[in-house]
Image: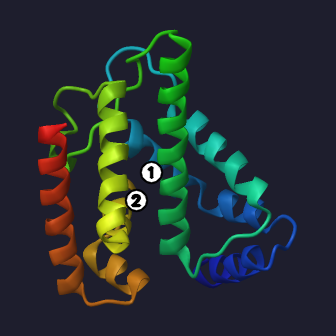
Amino acid sequence: MSAGITLLIASANQGVDGAVDRLYELLYADLRQIAHARLRGGRGPTLLDTTSLVHESYLRLVKLQQLRVEDRSHFLAYAARVMRSVVVDLVRESRAERRGGDQLMVTFDTQAADAQPATSDDVLQVHEALGELAAIDERLVRVVEMRYFVGLEMDEIAQALGVGKRTVERDWEKARSFLYASLRRG
């Protein structure tokens, strides 16, 4: 299956019709897991469920017509970024229209999954903090996306980024410290 995914990614990078569709089909379980992690921790009704988030991210990706990813890890990280964008856009839309704000529940800390659910303000604060972090070091944001949103191990992230495992571990600690400080002052 890994060889098939690699070929599909190459086809998607070249803009071959149906390649992204087939890629989503093969990685659907992984994408649902990412979406579920993105939305976990919520209590009560939410604006999105796991399936809706996966499908909405798919619609955004097929609009691109051509991807620029190297492997499975890059694709899943990119899909996680698209999912984050979907969630942030939905929160902004609900706040702008003043209809039912604060219904989307998202957590940031991987150990806080069972703790208090996040509000739409939290979603926007995390998004803004990741934007600030991107201005400082884009790789730190990629590490957060791959580790937290995709659930990749340090070795997998290191391979995807072309750096050593220890570098990824340091980046993860730097990113967590930055985001913690940013969210505390926000």
The residue that appears at 31% across and 24% down in the rendered structure is 119
The reply to whether residue 148 is in sight is no
Residue position for label 2: 150
The residue that appears at 47% across and 64% down in the rendered structure is 77
- Please state which of residues 130 and 117 is positioned toward the viewer in this rendering: 130
Residue 146 — which label? Answer: none
Q: Specify the quadrant of the image occupied by residue 183.
A: top left
Residue position for label 1: 34
Inspect the image, locate mark 2, and give the three-letter code of the amino acid beneath it.
Answer: Val
Where in the figure is residue 101, as x and y percent of width and height?
43, 15
Where in the figure is residue 14, as x and y percent of width and height?
79, 80
Where in the figure is residue 59, as x and y percent of width and height?
72, 46
Q: Is residue 40 left or right of residue 182?
A: right
- First reached walking from the N terminus: tag 2 or tag 1: 1
CA neighbours of label 2 inside 10 A, class few (<14), some (14 to 19), many (20+): many
Q: Specify the quadrant of the image occupied by residue 28.
A: bottom right
The residue that appears at 49% across and 37% down in the rendered structure is 87
Where in the figure is residue 180, as x and y percent of width and height?
14, 49
Image quadrant where one finds the N terminus: bottom right
